[in-house]
Every structure is written in structure tokens, then in C-alpha cells.
């Protein structure tokens, strides 16, 4: 369908007949408004005259391209009057896809229409293909993220060896996989007996929860005494999930509080937007067991999809498998430890064991030493055989005091026939050096009488050294943290003192300065008597100096307010052209007096900025007056604004460029620091103490923007204020 727009009926008729003979359907419009109304529903291409009675053809083209419903329509300008190259350029600039002039041959017109339609169809097909590909990419990315999260949890669970490590991995990786704000793991408490059907859960790991919550929910019921559901007023998502073996997903904090009233205080305290509980299930069908559950809180509302549900169930199964592996490993470790203790007490030691093994008689004399014990103590079996072992390796304490055998735990083990297990001590190597050991001594009793003992030794030096190093590093870290905190407090105190001092001094200075100005004005008005021309000139200098000092004091007060955070911002939508519009009236006389040209490029009417109107005016006025200050007679100051790309609503940049003295590159980074004048020699003729740019930068940041500078010495400087873009009211 081709929409032909021309206010001349004869032209419309001719073009329409050409198109219809070529097989096209045609809709006609005599004006721009009618064309804009018909285009969204009745056109695949628009042939558009330039001179229309209501809306200019260029404007119609611009509106068509600006409207999302018609932006894809090819626009072909056809004009009998606007035939110059500049007219063609103007038409193409506003968005037209082609430009023909009368007289035009039917074949050329039809060929142009077909070419534009082919191009439009290709673009439409490309857009549709891109949309399909984008959707596929998004879905693939979501799937990849799900797989990555599950793999991260799988890897962490595979590395966990104990129940505590498994719970820590679930807490860490499970929370990451689900993007949670708070996470907790609860495991069932063994029943009191066969008749006890109450399911009780214990909170074994938690992160992100208030302390009051972890205390109150340390151990809680998950079922009624008969094994059924709890009453609604005491039920919880994790209780339902573990009891039923199905995940519970609550979208919205109010929904969670309504279904589970006990959660309302936590929902309000934690700003919970979604609540999730996942059971740890092992096995299938009738053999399925629930080994615990994970409950999490999200601070963003979220919808659970079928893929999310499958991910949750897979997570629960993996967590259950890891817990079961840890339980079996714990049981295996316990059995192994028991077997090892039994072997230490009852079996003969082989020489290939890694532990140091010594056999003693009832008097404590060495009867056997394996190679591991020789390496640990530095003595050979031949050197100690028949010797009282205590007298050679345990006779002295590390502080030099003697250590009688009667006081030694190992000696008491021989005397009382009681085993000593896991005794951490320091023994003496050959040569006198001490070595950290962990010793286990098992008396050998026959017919109620101690006939000897089996001594097992383990080198504990590496662990002790590591612990000592860890303690040393912790102490260093605590000292460093304390020093950093003290330095921060001192710096903050000094900064507050500086601000208080500047504020007080500024207020105190304003009173005498205002008095000076007032009395100078009284004298100037002749209230104190006649004033000569020389005196009037002196009064003018006094008043100029007084105004200068008042300005400096005002700068100091403004700086103190900004730096202390006492400035309040009222952010509204402000048209960009208004921001520069009021400047010329304020600074025009100063520019004329100094002989500096002021030029303001008009801002687009549709350009809006989100800012505090007064603070924006303050920053721009400061930048313009600052540019005037550093630009000599005959110079020029230009102001302009433009839209800039930025995530969200975009940004607006206000630019102030001068042809003044400029700033050296090595000094450019210091110009926004308070009380800094970059080049005292260059800036001596100008006023100020170096606060204007510091205040302006902080105000820009307070409005969510930035202030930057570029400069070339001798050629001038450019200051750019960038603020978030605003939306046109009513748009």
C-alpha cells in the first residue's frame, strides 16, 4: 500500500494511476495532518510533496521517522518546486529515504518505489531475525547462568568433606546461585523415640539475618505432633518445604506475611520482596528422604519459572547428596579413628607406619623405636635402647625447669594404667632442641598389672608454626585496623574542626564587612557632610574591596555547607534553554565593561535536564564569571548545551568555553581542589581564593552529575557540566 500525499489533485491522480498500473494499491491524502493520521494503518511507503497547506512536507517526514509506529516506512519526497541540491539535502536530513523532482518519468518513480520497498522489506526481515536471535541469545544466557550456578554449587559441595563444610558451601554458593539477601540452612533434629512423629528443625548455618531472628529460630517445629501441617500462625516456608518435600516460593513480602504470619516482623525488618524455601531431597518415590532445607530472602520481587523450579529441585538434590556423603564420611572417619585407637592399644607396631612408635617396659625403659620416631627425636633405637625414655627426651621443660617423671602425664599413665590420648607437648631432640609433638600413650595391662606401654608420637611443629604465624598476622591486622580507624577519626575530627572554624570566621567577618559597606554608603550619600571627588573615588575603592571580601566570605560559607553535606537538593525537570537564558542579563554589563564578547548558542527546546534549578544556575553563573575573570579585553566567552548518551534518560552537557590565559597541563588536575589557585602569578590580577570551582564540582556531584575541564595555555579553557537528562513534562 502506497500513501500519496499532495495538495494538488491532478498530481495525486497522475501518480496514483502510475502506481496502480504497476500493481500497487494507493491511498491518497491532500495534507500533512491527513497523511500522519493514515500512515500508521494504511501505508507501506509514503510519496510526499514538500509544499502542503497545513504541515510542511519536511516536518511530516520528520514526524513519521520520530513515531515508532511509522519510523520504518520509506519516505520518498516528490517535488516540483524544491529542486535544488540544498532542498534534496534538507529532505534527506529530516529522514526521507529518497528525493525525486517533477517532471519525473513513470518508470523512474516505479523503480524508486520498488527499490525502497525492497529495502524496507529487507530491513523488516532483518529486524525480525535479529529479534528472534536476541531472544535465543537471552534464553541461552539464562540457561548458561543456571548451569554455571549449579556447577559452582556442585564444585563447592564436591570439595566439602564435613557437614559443616557442606552447610557453609550451601550457604555461600546456594545464596549466590539464587541471588539472595539472606540465606539459612536447617537440618532435622533426631526424634526423641519411635513414637515421636514431630518434625523439628535446627538452624545450623545462616547469613544476612538479624541476630534476633537466628536466636529465635535456632530450633523450631516443622510439623504438628501427628506429623501433619502446623497451624498457620506458627507455620513457616522452610517447615512446609521440608515436611512436604516441595519448594515454596512466595512472590512479594506481603504474600509471605499473609500466608505465614510469623514472618511479618522479618518481612518488615528486612524489606523482603520474595521468600523461597528449598528441600534437600534424596531418592525417588517411596524411598525419597528429606535431609533438610534451605530458606532464602530476596529484596527484589521475582517470578519462578519452570526452569527456575527445576534448578531449585536440582540444587536441593545436590545438597542432599552432599549431606549424605558428609554423613557417611563422618561415620567412616569415626570408625577409622576407633580402629586406630584400638590398634594403638592392642597391636604390635609395624615399622612402616608414619607415626613415631615407641614401646616401653613398666619402668619406662625403651624396648622398641620405629624409624619415624628416630627421625622425629633425632636418636637411633640403638642409642636409647634400655634407657628410660623420659630421662632422655622429656626431662626438662621449655622454660628450663626440670620435669620429673612423676609429674609427666606419660609417667602417670604407666603408674595408673590410664591411657593418655592426644597430649600436645614439647620433647627434646638429640642436641637439645625442642620439637612439638602430639603423644598418645596406651598402657599394656596383663592380669591387672601394667607390663609396659605403647607410645605414639606425631610431629606437630608445622601446625604450631602455622598457628603462631596466623596469630602474629591477626595481631598485625588488628593493629593496622586500629591505626587506620584512629587515623580516620583524627582526619574526620580535623575536617569538622576546619569546617566549624571556617563557618564561624566567615560569619564573624560578615558583620564588620557589612558595617564597612553601610558606613561607606552613608558617607557617599553626604549624610556625614559634603564629599569631594577625591573622597568619592576613595569610597568607591573601599566599597569595591568590601564587596570583594563579602564575596570571598560567601564562597567560604558555601564551601563549608557543601562539604559538610548541609546543602539540600530539589531535583526537578528543567528546560535546558532556561538555564542559560537568565545568564546574559546577569553578566552582560560585566562583559561590556571589560570588553569581552559573550555568545550563547541556543539549546534545543526539547532538551530537558534533571537538576536543582537554583544550584544549576549557581554553577553556570560561577563558570561564566570565572571565564570572564580569566579572559582579557577583546576575548570571547561561548556557552552551549547538547544531549549526550548515557544509560537511562541520557545526559545534558553545558559547555563554557573562553579564550583566556588557559591552565598548564600539570596544574589541570588541581583546579577543583579547595583553596587552590593554579598559577598565582597568572591569576594575581583576578579575584578569589580558589573555592568557586570546588563548590561548583561538589554541587554538580550532588545533582548526580560531573564537572570537567580542558585547557590549552594561551588559547583558553573549556568547562563542561554534565547532568542527567530529564523527560519533557507531559511526554
Image: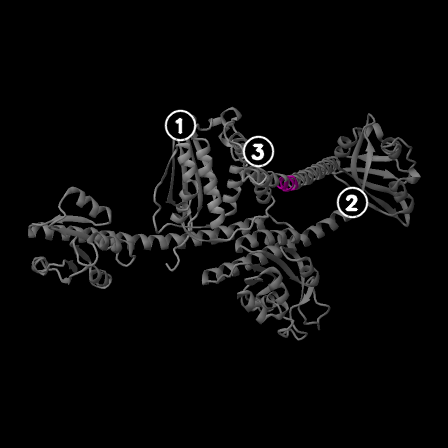
Indicate whether residue 495 is drawn in magenta.
no
Q: Is residue 387 above or below residue 211?
A: above
At label 1, counting other C-alpha atoms closer than 10 Å, the crowd grade (few under 14, some 14-19, many 20 or more) is few
Mark 3 vs mark 2, CA separation in Å: 78 Å
**Extent of the magenta region:** 503-511
Q: In this rendering, would 104 be left or right of 42?
A: left
Residue 454 or residue 413, whichever sits in front: 413
Of labels 3 and 1, earlier in sequence is 3
Mark 2 vs mark 1, CA separation in Å: 90 Å
Of labels 2 and 1, earlier in sequence is 2
Residue position for label 2: 344
Residue 345 coordinates in the image, percent (x, y): 80, 46
Residue position for label 3: 675
- Find residue 317 and name its label: none
Residue at image position (90%, 45%) is 450
Residue 233 or residue 515, whichever sits in front: 515
Name the element at disc 2: helix
For the question of whether residue 653 can be seen, the reply is: no
In the rendered structure, are the residues bearing label 3 and label 2 in contact, judged by CB atoms less than 8 Å apart?
no
Indicate whether residue 507 is drawn in magenta.
yes
Residue position for label 1: 715
The part of the image, by quadrant, that contains residue 526 is: top right
Amino acid at each position: 500500500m502506497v500513501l500519496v500525499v499532495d495538495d494538488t489533485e491532478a498530481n495525486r491522480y497522475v501518480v496514483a494511476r502510475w502506481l496502480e498500473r504497476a500493481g500497487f494499491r494507493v491511498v491518497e491524502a491532500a495534507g500533512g495532518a491527513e497523511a500522519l493520521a493514515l500512515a500508521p494503518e494504511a501505508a507501506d511507503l509514503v510519496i510526499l510533496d514538500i509544499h502542503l497547506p497545513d504541515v510542511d512536507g519536511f516536518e511530516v517526514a520528520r514526524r513519521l521517522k520520530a513515531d515508532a509506529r511509522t519510523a520504518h516506512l520509506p519516505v520518498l519526497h516528490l517535488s516540483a518546486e524544491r529542486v535544488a541540491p540544498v532542498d534534496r539535502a534538507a529532505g534527506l536530513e529530516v529522514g526521507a529515504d529518497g528525493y525525486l523532482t517533477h517532471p519525473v518519468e513513470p518508470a523512474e518513480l516505479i523503480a524508486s518505489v520498488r527499490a525502497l520497498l525492497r529495502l524496507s522489506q529487507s530491513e523488516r526481515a532483518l529486524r525480525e531475525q535479529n529479534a528472534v536471535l536476541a531472544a535465543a541469545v537471552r534464553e541461552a544466557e539464562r540457561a548458561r547462568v543456571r548451569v554455571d550456578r549449579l556447577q559452582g554449587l556442585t564444585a563447592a559441595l564436591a570439595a566439602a568433606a564435613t557437614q559443616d563444610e557442606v552447610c557453609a558451601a550451601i550457604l555461600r554458593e546456594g545464596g549466590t546461585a539464587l541471588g539472595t539477601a539472606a540465606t539459612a540452612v536447617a537440618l532435622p533434629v533426631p526424634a526423641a523415640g519411635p513414637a515421636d512423629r514431630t518434625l523439628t528443625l535446627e538452624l545450623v548455618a545462616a547469613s544476612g539475618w538479624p541476630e534476633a531472628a537466628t536466636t529465635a529460630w535456632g530450633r523450631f517445629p516443622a510439623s504438628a505432633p501427628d506429623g501433619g501441617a502446623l497451624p498457620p500462625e506458627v507455620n513457616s516456608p522452610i517447615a512446609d518445604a521440608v515436611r512436604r518435600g516441595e519448594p515454596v516460593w512466595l512472590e512479594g513480602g506481603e504474600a509471605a506475611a499473609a500466608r505465614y504470619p510469623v514472618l511479618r516482623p522479618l518481612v518488615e525488618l528486612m524489606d523482603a520482596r520474595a521468600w523461597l524455601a528449598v528441600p534437600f531431597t534424596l531418592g525417588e518415590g517411596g524411598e525419597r528422604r528429606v535431609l533438610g532445607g534451605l530458606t532464602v530472602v530476596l529484596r527484589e520481587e521475582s517470578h519462578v519459572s519452570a526452569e527456575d523450579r527445576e534448578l531449585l529441585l536440582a540444587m536441593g538434590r545436590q545438597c542432599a547428596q552432599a549431606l549424605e556423603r558428609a554423613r557417611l564420611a563422618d561415620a567412616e572417619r569415626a570408625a577409622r579413628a576407633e580402629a586406630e585407637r584400638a590398634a594403638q592399644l592392642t597391636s604390635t607396631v609395624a615399622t612402616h607406619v608414619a607415626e613415631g612408635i615407641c614401646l616401653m617396659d613398666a619402668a619406662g625403659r625403651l624396648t622398641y623405636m620405629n624409624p619415624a620416631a628416630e627421625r622425629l627425636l633425632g636418636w637411633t633405637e640403638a642409642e636409647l635402647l634400655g634407657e628410660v625414655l623420659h630421662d632422655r627426651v622429656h626431662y626438662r621443660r621449655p622454660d628450663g625447669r626440670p620435669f620429673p617423671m612423676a609429674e609427666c602425664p606419660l609417667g602417670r599413665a604407666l603408674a595408673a594404667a590410664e591411657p593418655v590420648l592426644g597430649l600436645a607437648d614439647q620433647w627434646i631432640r638429640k642436641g637439645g632442641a625442642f620439637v612439638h609433638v602430639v603423644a598418645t600413650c596406651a598402657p599394656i595391662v596383663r592380669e591387672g598389672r601394667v607390663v609396659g606401654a605403647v607410645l605414639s608420637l606425631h610431629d606437630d611443629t608445622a601446625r604450631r608454626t602455622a598457628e603462631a604465624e596466623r596469630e602474629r598476622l591477626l595481631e598485625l591486622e588488628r593493629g593496622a585496623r586500629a591505626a587506620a580507624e584512629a587515623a580516620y577519626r583524627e582526619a574526620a575530627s580535623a575536617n569538622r574542626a576546619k569546617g566549624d572554624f571556617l563557618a564561624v570566621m566567615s560569619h564573624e567577618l560578615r558583620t564588620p564587612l557589612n558595617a564597612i559597606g553601610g558606613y561607606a554608603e552613608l558617607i557617599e550619600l553626604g549624610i556625614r557632610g559634603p564629599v569631594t571627588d577625591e573622597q568619592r573615588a576613595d569610597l568607591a575603592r573601599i566599597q569595591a574591596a568590601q564587596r570583594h571580601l563579602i564575596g570571598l566570605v560567601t564562597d567560604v560559607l558555601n564551601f563549608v555547607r557543601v562539604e559538610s553535606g548541609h546543602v539540600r537538593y530539589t531535583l526537578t525537570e528543567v528546560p535546558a534553554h532556561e538555564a542559560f537564558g537568565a545568564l546574559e542579563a546577569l553578566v552582560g554589563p560585566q562583559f561590556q565593561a571589560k570588553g569581552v564578547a559573550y555568545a550563547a548558542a541556543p539549546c534545543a527546546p526539547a532538551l530537558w535536564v534533571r537538576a536543582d534549578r537554583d544550584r544549576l544556575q549557581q554553577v553556570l553563573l560561577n563558570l561564566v564569571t570565572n571565564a570572564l575573570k580569566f579572559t582579557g579585553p577583546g576575548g570571547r566567552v561561548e556557552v552551549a548545551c547538547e544531549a549526550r548518551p548515557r544509560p537511562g534518560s541520557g545526559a545534558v552537557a553545558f559547555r563554557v568555553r573562553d579564550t583566556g590565559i588557559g591552565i598548564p597541563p600539570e596544574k589541570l588536575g588541581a583546579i577543583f581542589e579547595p583553596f587552590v589557585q593554579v598559577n598565582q602569578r597568572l591569576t594575581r590580577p583576578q579575584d578569589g581564593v580558589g573555592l568557586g570551582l570546588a563548590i561548583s564540582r561538589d554541587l554538580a556531584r550532588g545533582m548526580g552529575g560531573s564537572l570537567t575541564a580542558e585547557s590549552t595555555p594561551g588559547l583558553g579553557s573549556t568547562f563542561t557540566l554534565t547532568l542527567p537528562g530529564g523527560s519533557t513534562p507531559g511526554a
